[in-house]
Amino acid sequence: MWGFLFLNYFYLLERKGTLMQFSQIFLMSLQSLKNNRLRTSLTILGVVVGIFSIIVIMTILTMLQTSIEEGVSFLSKNTFQIQKFPPIRTGGHGEWEKYRNRKDITLEDFFRLQEMLPQAKYVAADQGMGGRVIKYRSKETNPNIYATGVTAAVMQTSNLTIKEGRGIQETDVDYSRNVCVLGPDVEEKLFAGIDPIDKKIRLDNVELQVVGIFEKQPGMFGQSFDTYVALPLTTFQSIYGKRTRSVDITVMSHSEEDYDEVIEAAIGAMRTIRKVEPGAENDFNIFSNESLMGQINDITGGVKIGAMVVSIIALIAAGVGIMNIMLVSVTERTKEIGIRKAIGARKKTILMQFLIEAVVLCLMGGFIGILLGVGVGNLAGAALNAPAAVPIDWVLIGLFLCVLVGVIFGTYPAFKAANLDPIEALRYE
């Protein structure tokens, strides 16, 4: 037992001595860099450029992605949408021509799907048209209102909540009632300081009674999504006709467990309704919040890879510069190294000192590049009205790359310094 205690005591002393030695080496490295400020500044400039280029791009992408996620996450949980066109346009003109030539999804298709999909919790439909003007007495909105016809279940499937009054009900759809629910921006424009419930507005010369007001929705790039008015889908079609555009159908499952099963059932039912031949491609698109974000990530992924490649090339160039500067430093300090070795400095100590100098150079450049990148990135993102962001994961990746570059390109100069012959080093002039 006493032997174990003595061994443990000497281990702690040795560990304490190692920590003290490391701290001394670290302070000596900092002093060396301080003594050559101009050289140090020029050396870290390459690292600053490399880290700045990746952090500024990733900051902007993070801001844009956050804004896009808030804007496109309009579907409720365990919900997917069926529509004629894909949610994001990809491919050339020919690809889009294929989508345009598809048959429209009709209100009759929706009613049939509703009957054929009893396992779904909610099935809703909507159809819209932009560029509308709403009038109330002498006031009117700009011609930027989106009029959307909906069925009652849209409230549950599209993350919509009512601030005042009520939403669109099934009886409103069944009897094509002239009622509507206003978006918050429309209410502010037409009814500032006035209770809008039961007031009459005019939409394309059709009088509608206001029965409710929606809560605000998340915007995208500072642009509001609240300039809209919802009315019963049958009323919408009586005003604008059935063929203004294709109907979008939204389906919600009861839980996450039966989500995939409901999607498969919906695909089968839609193929039957639209008489799609066996083996033929679907003539409709299905997407969810998750699949939509997956497509957005695929698009931004290429940009991230490009930024990473550019940054790595810049860091390699900076690393070569660091290695050259460190080799010059070794040559200049040959006599100093010889003296230190002559009085007992070990190879490990010399090696550690020069490695630390290289890593500190890279980290100094890395910290400056990160601060500049986050600052400039947020300024650029603010111009697009995107919310401020700090890409923590890429900041950590940037710091790791700095350490890696310092170790890789500092090893050879450090090895050369550690293996100098002390006698030859003392003779060096």
Image: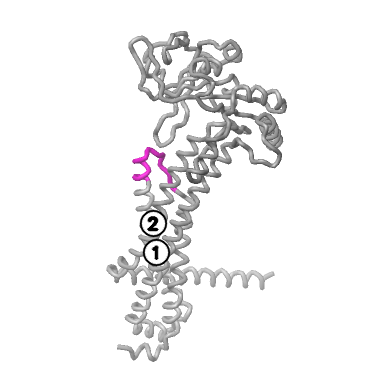
Residue that badge 1 annotates:
314
Which residue appears at 30% of the width and 67% of the height? Answer: 42
The furthest residue to the left: 38
Q: Nearer the viewer, residue 202 or 112?
A: 112
Q: Quadrant of the N terminus?
A: bottom right
Q: Nearer the viewer, residue 393 or 335?
A: 393
Which residue appears at 46% of the width and 64% of the height? Answer: 403
**Mark 1 element type:** helix
Q: CA distance from mark 1 to mark 2?
A: 9 Å
Question: Where is residue 359 shown, x and y percent of the image?
Answer: 42, 67
Residue that badge 2 annotates:
53
Residue 230 in the magenta stretch? The answer is: no
Question: Where is residue 198 shown, x and y percent of the image?
Answer: 47, 8
Specify the amino acid type for callout 2: Ser
Is residue 53 left or right of 2 when viewed as pictured? left
Residue 28 visible in the picture: no
Which residue appears at 69% of the width and 28% of the height? Answer: 120
**Mark 2 element type:** helix
Residue 187 visible in the picture: yes
Q: Quadrant of residue 174?
A: top right
Q: Magenta part of the protein: which range?
A: 378-390
Q: Is residue 59 shown above or below 182?
A: below
Q: Quadrant of residue 289?
A: top right
